[in-house]
Image (cartoon, rainbow, N blue to C red):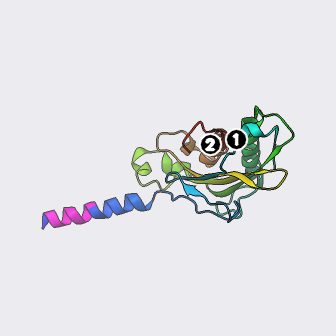
Amino acid sequence: MLNRTLCVVALAASSLLTACGADTVARTGFIPKSVPMSKVDGDTSSYKAKGFELSQFGKVVVEPIQGPPTNEGKIEPKDMEDLRARFQTSLQKSLEATGGKGDRTLVVRASITALKPNKPLLNAAPQTQILKRGYGYAACEIYATDGKDGQTMAAWMNTQDTQRFGTEKLSELGTAQKACEEWGPAFRAFITGTTSK
């Protein structure tokens, strides 16, 4: 009887642990549906047109950041503007030096597609972190088109979850701020081929 009870308790605990983690945010449609995205890992999907090289473009224009489509986390408008500004700056700085020549322009469009703020009080003690109840996440979609003909040259989407050993879990928007600052360099690394993502 004791073995059966222990088995039931172990199964219940394991199902709780897996149920509380954040899921990868599904494609929202910001990236055109005609773009054939391929899953890279559990958090990232991407597409790159055959023969596309960033050096083929002499100029990159980053349009204003969009999204998120809903504000489920009840984030203040000024905080949303700050997140969009961080993401905009991250992309612009990462793509400002293309190394390319000529008159071709790469137009980059990006959106924060989902946000869930952290709950810092639930992340203060190690025992409350196990169930990830206070963890948030942020997701984005980015795509780049040829400014001349509108052909999609590259697309990338990613969801970033709060990390257990990171400090971002100690503020409501820590995960979102970190993600917005990292997405620009990650997108550049993807389109230049310096990472598998």
Residue 163: % across, % down: 50, 45
Q: How many marks?
A: 2
Looking at the image, the residue that sits furthest to the left is 1
Looking at the image, the residue that sits furthest to the front is 51
Residue 10: % across, % down: 26, 60
Helix, strand or loop at mark 1: loop
Q: Nearer the viewer, residue 185 or 146?
A: 146
Q: On residue 190, which mark appears?
A: 2
Tell me if residue 67 is in the magenta stretch: no
Image point 82% across, 55% down: which residue?
149
Question: What residue is pinned by disc 1?
Answer: 53
Q: In which quadrant will I find the C terminus? A: top right
Q: Name the amino acid, label 1.
A: Glu
As drawn, 8 above or below 76: below
Q: Name the amino acid, label 2.
A: Phe
Q: Quadrant of residue 53?
A: top right
* Dominant SS type (magenta): helix
